[in-house]
Image (cartoon, coloured by chain):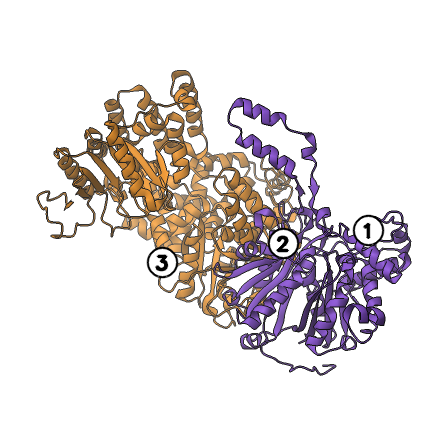
């Protein structure tokens, strides 16, 4: 057997040079079977960089010249990795559609060399096989995947605002049929080995330890038949969905879904839908060409640039999980069985922590168990969890009125009512009951200072804010709040936990409202003011949906509850009295017990439809004002809600609440649903032009009051460009 | 301390009971019916771990009694230990000595401690009598075997044609389990025999049953059971927390008990559902370790095990088992019946409890059956089952033995010291007894 590093095909001595990382490795066996490794064993992640693509090209050209070649095995660098797709920095750098299309053509032409070899090629997949990784595998003649837990198979390109460019739309549609291709490509859904096998994306599923042997056996079997590829034919529904009458129906349904809700802001899925149909209607070369053109078109869109920016921010946030001094969290005690406490406890149990949820109300505890069960049942029905896995999650969540012994606890977290005295009392009790010195004392407060809670406690350094958003199972952001006394180890441990829970941590200082609620305050306040001026809630919400928010501000107020809105806004008013005077609507709604969905409805009805009891409160306030009702234009609504939000975000940065613009962008996208396609609030502001934003705010301040006055920081940035 | 012991008080190798918890005991088919034996055991083990400062890695073995383990979880102790979050390296096994299973688990811990096979044990028992299955007999098994072996359509048809509807008649596990296969007697029949032997009449049985309910109701009101019970939110729907035993009838009247018809011997018998134990779901877990280990870990025990014994007798009078097991247990503890401040004698049947009381005081019985010189002694009714017993609380077979020990340990603690006996009769003709000393 000889090892050849493809850059120097003449170097036949294996010991000469260790193969460079970042290139593919070719080993040609004496039996005529070549093993093509996508990376060196030392590489934890394999992506398609320009170097690696070119080294693949050289390797495949070399193989084409080997007369004794009988078959090729394509593998990842080692256990737990295949290929995670294209290097995202490449995607980021392309600004010219022609350049994008050319890059797609180049990559796909290299991959096609696998198809052009006259011998069979088998891919052995033992880890992530994403995007360009799967596109390579799709050019192989047979795919064998393992049951390794790292195996993820899919084409998630749309999540970066682009379409697959290396033949993925064409090959996957022809291999698995239109239904499966659309399912995978339009949503960017990732599959474990088992469902991938079921949908026909891979041909075999084998135990990880036997993957190479099994793939080799499959290759030998193919060689023995003398055919390059096994015969393939679509059957049943997959076949008929590709034929004219049903295909039209599928396309119509998919198109309609892509026009609804937030999907309409993203052009890539629509382009991908067209490409998948073309895979069935055009000759292959034309289909590939159309795909390359579509990649070029989508890769330069601001949406793609925004999503790629956001991708890097999420990677940056995940790195917070690896800070020095972070400890593992195994056992947790959650105090307070309300919506937040129960949700957090269920999430912790889901992610493998042993949790004890305590509340004095046994009814609340039963509801917490039932809520988790409902969620688990749903996941079991959808085959995302096996029954015994669901049972293990439920077993990890204990509920009790009694805290038990705290000596083995790593995380103590409270989610009780916002009462500083109560929280301090509970923290003191935790220490008195033997909570270890190394354990985290965390609070899920949204409005109280973490620093005050830590005051007077032994080891105040481990008191930290872990601010989850409702519902904690779904909302991807966690604000990690560093109080004045909080030490680095506590912040590191909190961040690590957040990442383990699948959340994106953003570290903030202990300032009123932290990041998200502080930026939300002017936004929601202004929405309420617009209502008092006579604007219909439906109009205000529609304007913001059109802007790209997942939910209108009025509906959001109903979900959050006017009691919470009143409480949080009064805290913020105390901190920023000149610009955060709460709209009188909050207090009036709270007084009228029209809190929103937690009561009989607020602005909207209880189930979120129709009018709620809050409309009467609104009418009363409008009458009191005595000014004639006016309705603002969509543009005015968006300006009055979004521009102060931009200003407040920069104020947070200037006040040191967060460390970087990246935190503003990620925090507001993940925490309040600021449109992801903008790439975040600061990118959006730059796209608008900071000078334009400042000028508009000055204008608004003249018309509506000082609350719109832009900050000095924003003015400075506007001048500096 | 009321009395000095005849043994050294702090023998480091004696088994200490550090803490213990149980689920509420609920009638079969009641609020716990959705929980399997492993679910109940998982819950008490988890609560025991969560309520103890002990690092779970310190636990050497988990031993649980279970008389009717489900086929899916035959070694229910191991299943529950893993599900409760004990380390995978902690060994666990299930013991089965019918009604004595839960007590046997404790005895086993003591034996292992003495043998040097571990120092810290979680013992207990679990039973879901709600989930005792209906069994299909060999006839149906044979039918499916033949059908499975049939290859050709004709063979299949032939196999199918041999089906007989009587094959579908189920065997009821709970009834079969409570029938002695050697004598063919149901447990209730053995109680009738004890009653006949000692001339215990229906009125005495009903009066005792009433007292059991009254004492249990008073104990519940005083919070005695709350001190040993953990609330449980049972699967599958987790609708509500179950916080208390549901078999205790505060409003029980003698008249109502007297109206009940005998169930086992309908013509001549006196045993009714009212003066017999209830069929119940529940689980118990106790943390035990050597006295020395408890001291080293800084844990305060509630009681020490001073003597244990198991004895056997004729299966048709199995209810007298406690009379046979108690003398050796007392002897090992260096005590006499008169030294005991509290006696927990399991109430399988009022007839059998009263029979034991008579036998203890019967010189003739003690001489003939136990080979003693004279009667063991009188049992003060006030010291016998002061918190009621299984007639009110129920008898989840595999769990009861551990429940008696738990209740006794707490009762001794409340009394501020002294010695107590927990003893029970075992279907098949055995008895077990354990002597505790308050810590």
Q: Earlier in the sequence, mark 1 or mark 2?
A: 2
Q: Are marks 1 and 3 on the same chain?
A: no
| Percent x, y of residue A112 | 21, 31
Q: Is residue A138 visible?
A: no
Residue indicated by mark 1: B273
Q: Which one is in front in this view, the residue at disc 1 or the one at disc 2?
A: 1
Chain A display color: orange
Residue indicated by mark 3: A322
Quarter location, residue A247: top left
Residue indicated by mark 2: B40
Q: CA distance from mark 1 to mark 3?
A: 64 Å
Chain B display color: purple
Quarter location, residue B430: bottom right
Q: Nearer the viewer, residue A466 or A378?
A: A378
| Percent x, y of residue A533 | 54, 39
Left of A326 or right of it: where is B170? right
Left of A17 or right of it: where is B112? right
Q: Sort mark 2 into few (<14), some (14-19) or many (20+) by Cα contacts within 10 Å.
A: many
């Amino acid at each position: 057997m000889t090892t050849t590093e493809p850059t120097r095909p003449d170097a036949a001595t294996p010991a000469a040079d260790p193969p460079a990382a970042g290139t593919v490795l070719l080993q040609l066996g004496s039996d005529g079977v070549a093993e093509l490794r996508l990376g060196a064993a030392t590489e934890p992640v394999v992506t398609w960089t320009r170097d690696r693509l070119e080294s693949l090209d050289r390797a495949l050209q070399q193989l084409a010249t080997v007369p004794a070649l009988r078959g090729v095995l394509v593998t990842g660098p080692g256990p737990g990795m295949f290929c995670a797709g294209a290097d995202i920095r490449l995607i980021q750098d392309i600004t010219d559609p022609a350049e994008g299309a050319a890059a797609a053509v180049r990559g796909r032409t290299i991959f096609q060399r696998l198809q052009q070899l006259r011998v069979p090629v088998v891919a052995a997949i033992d880890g992530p096989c994403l995007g360009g990784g799967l596109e390579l595998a799709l050019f192989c003649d047979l795919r064998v995947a393992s049951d390794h837990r790292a195996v993820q198979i899919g084409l998630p390109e749309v999540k970066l605002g682009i379409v697959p460019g290396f033949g993925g739309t064409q090959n996957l549609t022809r291999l698995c049929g239109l239904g499966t291709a659309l399912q995978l490509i339009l949503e960017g859904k990732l599959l474990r080995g088992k469902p991938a096998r079921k949908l026909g994306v891979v041909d075999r599923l084998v135990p990880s330890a036997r993957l190479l042997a099994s793939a080799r056996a499959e290759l030998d079997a193919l060689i023995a038949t003398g055919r390059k590829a096994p015969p393939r034919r679509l059957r049943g529904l997959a076949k008929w969905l590709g034929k004219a009458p049903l295909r039209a129906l599928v396309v119509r349904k998919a198109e309609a879904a892509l026009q609804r809700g937030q999907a309409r802001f993203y052009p890539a899925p629509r382009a991908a839908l067209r490409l998948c149909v073309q895979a069935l209607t055009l000759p292959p070369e034309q289909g590939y060409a159309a795909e390359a053109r579509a990649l070029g078109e989508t890769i330069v869109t601001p949406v793609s640039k925004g999503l790629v920016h956001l991708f890097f921010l999420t990677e940056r946030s995940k790195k917070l999980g690896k800070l020095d001094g972070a400890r593992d969290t195994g056992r947790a005690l959650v105090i307070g069985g309300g919506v937040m406490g129960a949700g957090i406890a269920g999430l912790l149990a889901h992610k493998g922590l042993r949790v004890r949820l305590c509340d004095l109300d046994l009814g609340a505890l039963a509801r917490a168990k039932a809520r988790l069960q409902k969620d688990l049942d749903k996941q079991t029905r959808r085959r995302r969890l096996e029954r015994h896995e669901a049972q293990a999650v439920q077993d990890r969540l204990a509920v009790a009125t009694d805290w038990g012994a705290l000596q083995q606890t790593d995380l103590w977290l409270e989610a009780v009512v916002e009462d500083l005295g109560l929280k301090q009392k509970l923290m003191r009790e935790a220490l008195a009951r033997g909570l270890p010195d190394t354990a985290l004392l965390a609070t899920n407060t949204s409005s109280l200072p973490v620093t005050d809670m830590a005051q007077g406690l032994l080891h105040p350094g481990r008191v930290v804010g872990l601010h989850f958003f409702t519902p904690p199972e779904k909302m991807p952001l966690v604000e990690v709040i560093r109080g004045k006394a909080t030490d680095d180890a506590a912040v590191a441990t909190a961040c690590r936990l957040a990442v383990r829970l699948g959340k994106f941590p953003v570290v903030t200082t202990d300032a009123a409202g932290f990041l998200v609620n502080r930026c939300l305050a002017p936004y929601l306040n202004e929405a309420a003011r617009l209502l008092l001026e006579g604007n219909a809630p439906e109009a205000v919400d529609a304007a913001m949906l059109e802007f790209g928010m997942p939910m209108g501000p009025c509906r959001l107020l109903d979900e959050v509850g006017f009691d919470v809105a009143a409480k949080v806004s009064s805290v913020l008013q105390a901190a920023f009295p000149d610009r955060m005077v709460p709209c009188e609507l909050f207090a009036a709604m709270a007084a009228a017990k029209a809190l929103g969905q937690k009561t009989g409805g607020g602005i909207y009805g209880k189930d979120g439809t129709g009018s709620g009891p809050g409309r009467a409160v609104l009418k009363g306030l409008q009458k009191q004002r005595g000014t004639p009702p006016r309705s603002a234009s969509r543009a005015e609504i968006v300006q009055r809600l979004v521009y102060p939000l931009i200003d407040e975000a920069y104020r947070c940065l200037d006040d040191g609440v967060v460390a970087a613009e990246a935190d503003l962008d990620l925090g507001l996208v993940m925490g309040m649903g600021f449109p992801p396609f903008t790439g975040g609030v600061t990118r959006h502001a730059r796209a608008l032009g900071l000078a334009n934003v400042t000028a508009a705010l000055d204008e608004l301040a003249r018309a509506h009051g000082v609350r719109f006055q832009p900050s000095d920081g924003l003015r400075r940035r506007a001048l500096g460009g | 301390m009321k009395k000095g012991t005849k043994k050294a008080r702090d023998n480091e190798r004696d088994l200490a009971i550090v803490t213990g918890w149980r689920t509420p005991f609920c009638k079969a088919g009641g609020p716990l019916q959705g929980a399997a034996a492993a679910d109940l055991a998982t819950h008490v083990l988890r609560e025991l771990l969560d309520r103890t400062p002990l690092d779970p890695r310190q636990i050497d073995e988990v031993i649980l009694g279970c008389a009717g383990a489900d086929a899916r979880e035959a070694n229910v102790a191991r299943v529950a230990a893993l599900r409760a979050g004990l380390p995978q390296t902690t060994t666990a096994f299930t013991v089965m000595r019918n009604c004595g299973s839960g007590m046997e688990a404790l005895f086993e811990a003591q034996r292992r401690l003495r043998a040097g096979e571990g120092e810290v044990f979680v013992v207990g028992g679990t039973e879901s009598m709600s989930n005792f299955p209906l069994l299909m007999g060999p006839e149906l098994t044979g039918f499916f075997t033949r059908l499975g072996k049939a290859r050709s359509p004709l063979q299949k048809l032939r196999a199918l044609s041999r089906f007989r509807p009587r094959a579908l008649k189920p065997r009821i596990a709970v009834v079969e389990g409570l029938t002695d296969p050697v004598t063919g007697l149901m447990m209730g029949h053995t109680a009738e025999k004890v009653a006949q032997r000692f001339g215990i009449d229906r009125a005495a049985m009903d009066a005792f049953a009433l007292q059991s309910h009254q004492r249990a109701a008073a104990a519940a009101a005083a919070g005695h059971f709350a001190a040993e019970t953990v609330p449980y939110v049972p699967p599958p729907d987790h609708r509500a927390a179950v916080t208390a035993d549901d078999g205790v009838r505060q409003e029980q009247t003698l008249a109502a008990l007297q109206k009940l018809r005998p169930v086992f011997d309908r013509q001549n018998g006196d045993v009714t559902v009212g003066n017999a134990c209830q069929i119940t779901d529940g689980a118990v877990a106790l943390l035990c370790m050597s006295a020395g280990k408890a001291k080293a870990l800084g844990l305060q025990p509630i009681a020490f095990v001073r003597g244990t014994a198991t004895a056997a007798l004729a299966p048709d009078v199995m209810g007298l088992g406690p009379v046979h097991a108690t003398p050796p247990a007392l002897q090992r503890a260096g005590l006499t019946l008169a030294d005991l401040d509290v006696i927990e004698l399991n109430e399988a049947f009022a007839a059998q409890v009263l029979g034991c009381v008579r036998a203890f005081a019967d010189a003739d019985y003690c001489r003939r059956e136990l080979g003693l010189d004279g009667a063991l002694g009188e049992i003060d009714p006030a010291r016998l089952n002061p918190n009621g017993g299984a007639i009110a609380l129920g008898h989840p077979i595999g769990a009861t033995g551990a429940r008696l020990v738990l209740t006794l340990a707490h009762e001794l603690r409340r009394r501020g010291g002294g010695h107590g006996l927990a003893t029970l009769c075992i279907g098949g003709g055995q008895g077990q007894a354990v002597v505790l000393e308050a810590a």
